[in-house]
Image: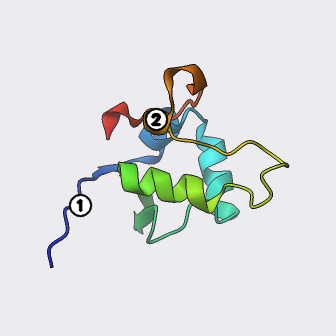
Amino acid sequence: MTSNHNFELIVVDEFAKRMGVGRTTVFKWKDENIVVQGEHYFSIGKVLRFLWSKETIVSLVKRNTPIKQDLAPPIVPRYLQKKSQQGSRINLDLC
């Protein structure tokens, strides 16, 4: 069984830029286990490297979408949205 993993390794600044947030938010997500080591990023010494791929972003969104849908609207990645629904700031064009 072969798997086709198309991903890019990016640093915190680039991940923050593509997600449309600041560096501080990325580190807050790390502290709150919103992004998980080994699934969304890994560290080499003190340097964090994020995996950037559609699969990683979809997993991040699914993992952090509230179970009770009446509390907040679901977060849908831009590439899955219809034009009228687009509003996500995540830049998946680079995947």
Residue 70 x/y as whole percent:
84, 48
2 or 1: tag closer to the N-terminus: 1
User: Mark 2 belongs to which amino acid?
Assistant: Arg
Numbered label attached to residue 13: none
- Front label number (2 vs 1): 1
Distance CA(mark 2)–CA(mark 1): 19 Å
Q: Is residue 68 left or right of residue 35?
A: right
Q: Which residue is mark 2?
A: 18
User: Mark 1 belongs to which amino acid?
Assistant: His
Farthest left residue in view: 2
Q: Which residue is mark 1?
A: 5
- Say which element carries label 1: loop
Q: Residues within 10 Å of mark 1 (few under 14, many from 20)?
A: few
Q: Residue at x 59, y 26 (%)?
A: 85
Residue 21 x/y as whole percent:
60, 35
Q: Quadrant of residue 36?
A: bottom right
Q: Is residue 30 left or right of residue 40?
A: right
Q: Quadrant of residue 6?
A: bottom left
Tell whether label 1 touches label 2 (CB within 8 Å): no
Front one among 88 and 27: 88
Please say whether residue 46 is visible from this viewpoint.
no
Front one among 22 and 56: 56
Q: Residue at x 57, y 42 (%)?
A: 76
